[in-house]
Image (spheres, helix red, strand yellow):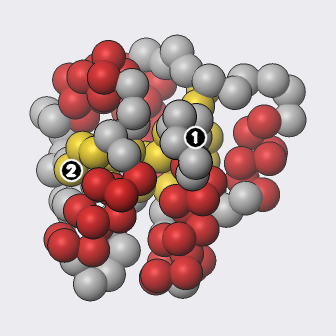
Amino acid sequence: MLVLEDNPEALLLLRHYLVPHAEVTFTSTVDEALAADKEHSSSACDLYILDINLGEDRDGVDVLHMLHARYGKANVRALALTAYALPGDRKKFLAAGFTDYLSKPFSRQQLLHILETVEPLSGARL
């Protein structure tokens, strides 16, 4: 599993929630995430958790599209993690190619529940 989150507090929270359940690589920039992904595998990770608003010239949707180009859309499962929580946002991110969507703030239970529906945590890779 690879996580891309640029907010240090959110990254710490994700680390706290996920480390007991899966092997995870945590990154905070687009370049760091793409390099870690390429370094660890010749195939897509079991799951990508991508923050949408990264404060860079690229966002989580851009990263998803780069992963689709690298591995093929059918081979990439990704969770959009975002503060965008207006009606229609979930539908927008699913249409962009995300497997599922979780809005911030979220609880441990919400995160683990959605991850179990997207990718069972046992045996998660990267």
Q: Does residue 49 appear to the left or right of 1 in the view shown?
A: right
How far across and down, in percent of the image, does residue 15 sit?
A: 22, 30
- Number of other residues with Cα within 10 Å of mark 1, as a class: few under 14, some 14 to 19, many 20 or more: many
Q: Does residue 94 appear to the left or right of 68 in the view shown?
A: right
Label 1 residue SS? loop
Q: Quadrant of residue 115?
A: top left
Above or below, 77 relative to 67: above
Q: Is residue 38 visible?
A: yes
Label 2 residue SS? strand
Q: What residue does disc 1 label?
A: 52
The one nearer the camera, 90 or 54, is 54
Q: What's the distance in space between the residues labelled 2 and 1, CA to CA?
A: 17 Å
How far across and down, in percent of the image, does residue 65 sit?
A: 60, 68
Q: What residue does disc 2 label?
A: 25
**Which residue sits furthest front?**
57
Above or below, 49 relative to 68: above
Q: Residue at x 18, y 71 (%)?
A: 40
- Number of other residues with Cα within 10 Å of mark 2, as a class: few under 14, some 14 to 19, many 20 or more: some
Q: Residue at x 57, y 51 (%)?
A: 58
Q: Residue at x 27, y 74 (%)?
A: 38
Q: Which mark is residue 32?
A: none
The one nearer the camera, 47 or 41, is 41
Q: Residue at x 80, y 47 (%)?
A: 92
The one nearer the camera, 120 or 1, is 1
Which kind of residue does numbered mark 1 sit on? Ile
Quadrant (top left, top right, bottom left, bottom right) of the N terminus: bottom left
Quadrant (top left, top right, bottom left, bottom right) of the C terminus: bottom left
Q: Earlier in the sequence, mark 2 or mark 1?
A: 2
Which kind of residue does numbered mark 2 sit on? Thr
